[in-house]
Every structure is written in structure tokens, then in C-alpha cells.
């Protein structure tokens, strides 16, 4: 669900979409931006910086310009070294490759990632839990996160997986935590009771005011989803929070813009 901050304005010709291996330059309705590939960092930049980077884009000088502008990473986070094998401590299960919303900026293609909508089978989810335990010893805390699409579409598998994982963890004397990222439109009281029972951290997407949210996050049929989101019950015992960004690895560059919308709607002065 990347919001349009990463979109190039339609009147910007393809030939002007400037990019190199180090940096992509783009313009949106909010100004000029530089997407620095190392670390996947997105910056607002002024016209002067945009011009300097544009001029340097094709040569080696681009790295020096990035450094001069303070945009280069102090320690490169990307190189060609093969990573050592890392053991798994946490898993994110995209248990529903489908969604009831059709957000305008969804990088998951409205939840189905551009293929046939489907749910993760229970066997796959349980095998993933087993993998998590195989990779860890009982002294290590593990974490299971549930994403989509909209994960509550596959509610039964979600619950059975949590119950299984909690039982296995208890049997091993191992600490486990759970979280979910949801669009908040399908939550019911039983879900909330379940999430509270298992100490879930629940992240619920809300994108600003009613007008903004309804425009950007409609149901598939086009109706706004603000009321369904705001009127649904909320888990209380876990760390329930409204958040910018949702679904399928939906921690993304667009979060900052959604967060700004939400803070504005709450009355904050946001640049
Ligand atoms: S709720 Fe999430 S997965 Fe569904 S359409 Fe919106 S951004 Fe995509």
C-alpha cells in the first residue's frame, strides 16, 4: 500500500524519470525527492539538490554529491558480500493474499499481488511455526506477525496457528509474541477478545480524516471504509495502535505521508 509519494507526476515524461544505481530522482505533488537505494531511504530535497543530483546521475560523481548533501549512508548497508546464514527469530505470515479494500496506493495490487486471490493453507502456516521453533532454542523469544492482503479474511487459519504456536511455545518453555496488521474493517468482538488473550500488538491502518481516508482507502466497490474502520471494536490489552501502513510487508516509504495525514486530521501542525 505505497501511497502516491513514489509516483512520478503523470506530466513528467518517462525520459525524465532520472535514476542511477545509487539514487532515483522523482517529483510528486509534494515536491522533489531522492530515493537513495542504499538503505531504501526517501528524502525530500530542494530544487538545488535535485539539479545537482540530476547533473551527476550518469557518472561516478553521484556518490560524492550524495555525500555532500548528507544523503549517503555513513556505513553502507548494501554490498556484494553474501550474508552469513542468520537464524530466524521472527516470521511474518502473509496468510491472506486477498483484501476487501482497494486502496489507491496498494503495492500488493489491492491485496492479491496481481495473481489469483488465495488464503494460506493451515498446513503451510503450521509448518512455518515449526520452522521458527527449529531455528531457535527455548531461551530465545520468538515472534509471529500476521499480514495480508487483509489477514482477517483468513481468520480461522490465523486463530488455529496462534493456538498451535502458543501451545508449542508453552511446551518448550519459550516466550512468544504475536502481532497483526489489519485494515480494521473486519474486526469483531471475538477477534479482539482473541487478540487480547494472546497479547497481540495490533496495528490498524487509518489514513487521515474521513475524506482523505475514504478517497484513498475505499472498499473494492468504491465505498469509503472510514466508518467501518472507526466503528469496529479494538483490542485493548495488547499494544493496539493506529498506524500508517498495512498489509503485505506494508512498512514502507509511504508511511510518512499517511502518518502526516493522520496527524493533520488529529489537529497537529504538520509541514
Ligand atoms: S488494506 Fe492493505 S492490502 Fe488491502 S488494498 Fe489496502 S493497502 Fe492493499
Image (cartoon, grey):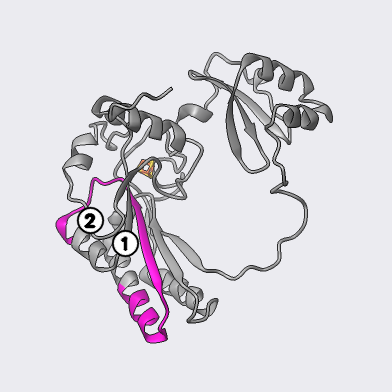
Q: Nearer the viewer, residue 206 or 10?
A: 206
The first of marks 2 and 1 along the sequence is 1
Mark 2, other Cα within 10 Å: few <14 / some 14–19 / many ≥20: many
Q: Quadrant of the N terminus?
A: top left
Q: At numbered mark 1, what does the secondary structure look like: helix, strand or loop?
A: loop
Tell me if residue 188 comes above or below residue 170 in the rendering: above
Judge left or right: residue 165 versus residue 92.
left
* Residue picked out by circle 1: 200
Q: What residue appears at the point 66 percent right and 30 percent down from the top-left corner?
A: 24
Q: At numbered mark 2, what does the secondary structure look like: helix, strand or loop?
A: loop
Which image quarter: residue 13? Answer: top right
Q: Within 8 Å of ligand 1, the CB of disc 1?
A: no
Q: What residue appears at the point 46 percent right and 72 percent down from the top-left corner?
A: 141
Tell me if residue 216 comes above or below residue 12 in the rendering: below
Judge left or right: residue 74 versus residue 135.
right
Look at the image and give the residue range highlighted in magenta. 163-190
* Residue picked out by circle 2: 235
Amino acid at each position: 500500500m505505497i501511497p502516491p509519494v513514489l509516483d512520478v507526476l503523470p506530466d513528467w515524461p518517462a525520459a525524465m524519470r532520472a535514476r542511477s544505481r545509487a539514487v532515483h530522482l522523482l517529483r510528486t505533488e509534494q515536491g522533489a525527492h531522492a530515493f537513495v537505494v542504499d538503505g531504501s531511504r526517501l528524502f525530500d530535497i530542494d530544487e538545488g539538490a535535485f539539479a545537482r543530483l540530476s547533473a551527476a546521475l550518469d557518472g561516478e560523481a553521484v556518490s560524492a554529491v550524495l555525500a555532500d548533501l548528507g544523503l549517503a549512508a555513513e556505513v553502507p548497508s548494501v554490498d556484494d558480500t553474501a550474508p552469513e546464514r542468520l537464524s530466524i527469530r521472527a516470521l511474518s505470515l502473509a496468510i491472506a493474499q486477498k483484501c476487501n479494500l482497494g486502496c489507491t496506493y496498494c503495492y500488493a495490487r489491492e491485496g492479491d499481488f496481481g495473481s489469483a486471490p488465495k488464503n494460506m493453507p493451515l498446513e503451510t502456516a503450521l509448518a512455518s511455526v515449526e520452522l521458527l521453533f527449529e531455528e531457535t532454542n527455548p531461551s530465545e523469544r520468538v515472534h509471529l506477525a500476521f499480514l495480508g492482503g487483509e489477514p482477517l479474511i483468513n481468520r480461522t487459519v490465523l486463530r488455529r496457528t496462534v493456538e498451535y504456536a502458543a501451545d508449542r511455545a508453552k511446551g518448550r518453555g519459550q516466550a512468544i509474541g504475536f502481532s497483526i496488521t489489519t485494515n480494521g474493517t473486519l474486526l469483531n468482538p471475538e477477534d479482539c477478545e482473541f487478540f487480547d488473550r494472546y497479547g497481540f500488538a495490533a496495528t490498524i491502518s487509518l489514513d487521515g480524516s474521513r475524506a482523505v481516508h475514504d478517497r484513498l482507502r475505499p472498499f473494492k466497490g468504491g465505498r469509503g471504509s472510514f466508518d467501518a474502520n472507526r466503528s469496529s471494536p479494538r483490542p485493548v490489552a495488547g499494544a493496539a495502535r493506529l498506524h500508517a501502513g498495512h498489509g503485505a510487508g506494508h512498512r514502507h516509504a509511504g508511511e510518512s505521508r499517511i502518518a502526516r495525514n493522520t496527524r493533520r486530521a488529529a489537529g497537529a501542525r504538520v509541514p
